[in-house]
Image (cartoon, coloured by chain):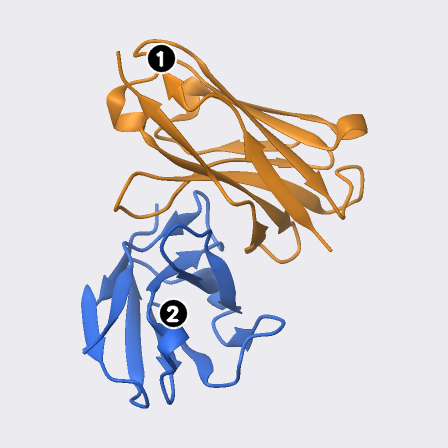
């Protein structure tokens, strides 16, 4: 059974850097084809894809946020880390991580999500 | 970037009725690489349909997906009380991955 869980601060100040960790079980990021993605959802709004990382350390970013995002993995700890710089109140959202297979492309399953509020 | 427009924004139906949700892409979706997700309040999205028409594991057969190119449909037959939620489409055939803005299915 695949499970994922996001962790990180619930409150960050404007201009600060957000660091979120996705800890997963039931699969390995050293297995060919496996990936983990990050998706966010502002309160009451739609989903927005942010970043992806694959078993071979291949990384993909949303073009609109690429300059602010960094995704990395720690295979030994079964973790994926997302950092987002220069946080702004519009970045207030629930941040989800999700399992993705290169050969499939959809996200399944998802973590429960973590709400991050950006406020001074 | 492929934009996805879902309609209607809100759909009000009664249990037992059929729901038809639309997802229209701004350009053709490669190889019907389109997925549908269900999201209930306070929960993460759940995969329903992938490849435009394949049901994910454990999804009841009252859920079905169809379409190709730029027009896709999620149909839910014989609505159950637990089906009232928000539904999102997602294309994964072209980078960047994009989601629709969602359709809220509410009890009439």
| Displayed quadrant of residue A85 | top left
- Chain holding disc 2: B
For the N terminus of chain A, give its image quadrant: bottom right
* Image position of B61 (left or right of A65): right
The mark found on residue B69 in the picture is: 2
- Between marks 2 and 1, how big is the CA–CA gap? 38 Å
The mark found on residue A9 in the picture is: none
**Which label sits in the foreground, 2 or 1?**
1
- A113, above or below B21, in the image: above
Badge 1: how crowded within 10 Å, few (<14), some, or many (20+)? Answer: few
- B3, above or below B80, in the image: above
| Displayed quadrant of residue A6 | top right
Q: Position of residue A62 (x, y in %)?
A: 42, 34
**In the figure, the blue chain has which letter?**
B
Badge 2: how crowded within 10 Å, few (<14), some, or many (20+)? Answer: some
* Image position of A65 (left or right of B61): left
**In the figure, the orange chain has which letter?**
A
Residue A13 versus residue A84: which sits nearer the camera? A13
Q: Which residue is mark 1?
A: A86
How many marks on residues?
2
């Amino acid at each position: 059974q695949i499970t994922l869980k996001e962790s990180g601060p619930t409150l960050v100040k404007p201009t600060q850097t957000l660091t979120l960790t996705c800890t997963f079980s039931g699969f390995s990021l050293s297995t060919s084809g496996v990936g983990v993605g990050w998706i966010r959802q502002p309160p009451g709004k739609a989903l927005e894809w942010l970043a992806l990382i694959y078993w071979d350390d291949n990384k993909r970013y949303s073009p609109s946020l690429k300059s602010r995002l960094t995704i990395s993995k720690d295979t030994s700890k079964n973790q994926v880390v997302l950092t987002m710089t220069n946080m702004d109140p519009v970045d207030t959202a629930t941040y989800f991580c999700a399992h993705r297979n290169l050969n499939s492309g959809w996200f399944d399953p998802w973590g429960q999500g973590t709400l991050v509020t950006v406020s001074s | 970037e492929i934009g996805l427009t879902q309609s209607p924004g809100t759909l009000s139906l009664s249990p037992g009725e059929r729901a038809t949700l639309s997802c229209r892409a701004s350009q053709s979706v490669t190889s019907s690489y389109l997925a549908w997700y269900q999201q209930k309040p306070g929960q993460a999205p759940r995969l329903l349909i992938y490849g435009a028409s394949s049901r994910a594991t454990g999804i009841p057969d009252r859920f079905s997906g169809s379409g190709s190119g730029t027009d896709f449909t999620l149909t839910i037959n014989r609505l159950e009380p637990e089906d009232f939620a928000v539904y999102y489409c997602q294309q994964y055939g072209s980078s960047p991955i994009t989601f629709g803005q969602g359709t809220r299915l509410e009890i009439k």
